[in-house]
Amino acid sequence: MTSARLLAPRTSVPAVQWRAREQAHHERADALTAGHRARAARGETHPVEDFLFTYYSYKPAVLRRWHPGAGVELTDAATDARAAWRWYAPGAEPGSLVVDATGFLAEKRRLVDATDRILRLTAGRTAQFGCFGLHEWAMVYRQGEHRHPVPLRLGQDATDAVVEAADLRCTHFDAFRFFTPDAAPRNREQPTRERQPDLEQPGCLHAGMDLYKWAIKLGPLIPGELLLDAFELARDIRVVDMQASPYDLDAWGYAPIAIEQAEGKAQYVRRQRGFAERGQTLRTRLLTALDEARAIARISRPERRRRTA
């Protein structure tokens, strides 16, 4: 636990209330991770549902840990296990605990500022809906071995033909970096890690999935309920991402979204628009949580500092 200084909270929550929220969080997290945990115990894998635990490398235990967010004082918490957790400090009321927003922001300033920039710039852009999920197709283009041990729905030659007839518009670096060498030059953009804040846009499915990553990285500043909402969005996006992929997932119970056909493209865009709306709501909530943490710590956003310099 952080040094014994008192941090001024904005909200004081009685123990009976915050413990009920914590218990509800545990139950929700356990339900969301039950399938993955059961498969892991049996040594089995799932090409769709296990992705969020392998690609992002966050264990179910991370999802299960509940935080109230910055500015919330948990009363009668001094004997709780979280008293030994990092980034917690005594609150104004004896025996209470609060998230140490000041300490977290001071130590992780570069991470927080970079995350804030991506979230804020993405939130301010108009969503684009013309990619049709072709990033997964570009990842297998003219490739004998594929990322997933699942057969291609159309076969290799027909899959390659779809890519060759398409206009590849991927703007997300962490999708683009898996394009095959033959597919990468076909893309409109050549995304890099450095350009990520300038290219990210709210219609991108991977940008929506990444909201879960940003929520994890912001740690105790993010209320547990928001973290699980971000995970649920990422889970739902992953399903559509793979339904629209070139893989044949019929054996796993997933009907294809045939984006090589007009009807499939329309279906994909409908789902994409829904995810974009959910994602923008979550971005706003994440940015609000960050602003609250900065207000508690009395730290301005980088943009404000530049304007007043």
Image: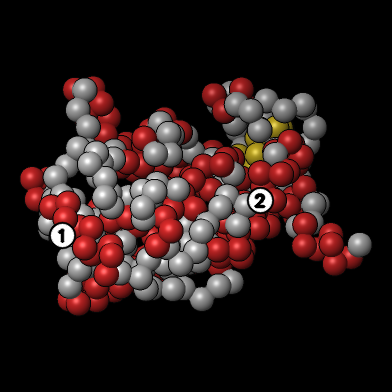
Residue type for callout 2: Ala
Q: Which residue is drawn at 22% across and 41% down?
A: 144
Q: Residue at x 20, y 68 (%)?
A: 260
Q: Residue at x 31, y 62 (%)?
A: 133
Quarter the N terminus occupies: top right
Q: Viewed as shown, does residue 193 lie left or right of 295?
A: left
Picture coordinates of residue 25, whole percent (x, y): 41, 42
Quarter the C terminus occupies: bottom right
Q: Which residue is drawn at 53% across and 48% down?
A: 214
- Is disc 2 surrounded by few (<14), some (14 to 19) or many (20+) residues within 10 Å? few
Picture coordinates of residue 86, whole percent (x, y): 63, 28
Q: Which of 80 and 199 is in front in this view?
A: 199
Say above or below: 105 vs 190: above
Say above or below: 176 vs 277: above
The colour scheme of the drawn protein is secondary structure
Picture coordinates of residue 8, whole percent (x, y): 76, 45
Say above or below: 14 vs 119: above
- Is disc 1 surrounded by few (<14), some (14 to 19) or many (20+) residues within 10 Å? few
Q: Which mark is residue 158?
A: 1
Q: Quadrant of residue 208?
A: bottom left
Secondary structure beneath dot 2 equals helix
Q: Give the residue pinned by disc 2.
A: 114
Q: Of tags 1 and 2, which is closer to the observer?
A: 1
Q: Viewed as shown, does residue 307 lie left or right of 62?
A: right
Residue 195 in view? yes
